[in-house]
Image (cartoon, rainbow, N blue to C red):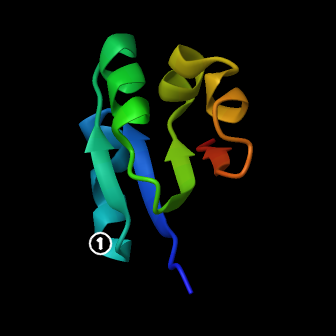
Amino acid sequence: MTMNTVAAVGARADVCGLALAGVDVVFAEDPDAVRRAWRALPATVGLVILTTEAARALGDTATAVDPARLTVVMP
């Protein structure tokens, strides 16, 4: 059985606390960094938590690239 992990992508100030819950955090401070981080996520990531800014930078990419990967946007 493959275990999926959880990752969070966004500005350091917005996602760093999630590491305390065992989330793999990826700091991305601008839209280009967000897109690079998204492409670099390992296949084992089953859930990606995005900041509002990160979701905006990805647009439809977050669901179009891999519909099996669940994405959620932080309020």
The residue shown at (38%, 65%) is 23
Camera-side residue of 55 and 52: 55
Q: Is residue 15 above or below residue 65?
A: below
- Residue at the image point whose x is 48% and y is 26% from the top: 54
- The vertical placement of 71 against 58, above or below, is below
Q: Which secondary structure lies at badge 1?
A: helix
The image shows residue 34 at horizontal and vertical percentages of 38, 25
For the N terminus, the image quarter is: bottom right
Determine which quarter of the picture holds residue 63: top right
Residue beneath the point at 42% across and 49% down? 8
Q: Considering depth in this image, is 23 or 45 the residue closer to the camera?
A: 45
| Residue 11 to residue 60: above or below | below
Label 1 is placed on what type of residue? Leu
> Residue 17 location in percent, x, y?
31, 59
Give the number of marks.
1
Q: Residue furthest front?
A: 1
Question: Measured from the top left, where is residue 38 in percent x and y?
Answer: 43, 33
Q: Residue furthest bottom?
A: 1
Query: For the residue carrying disc 1, how many other residues have a C-alpha within 10 Å: few (<14), some (14-19), or many (20+)?
Result: few
Q: Is residue 67 above or below residue 22?
A: above
Q: Which residue is mark 1?
A: 20
Q: What is the x, y in percent for residue 43? A: 46, 54
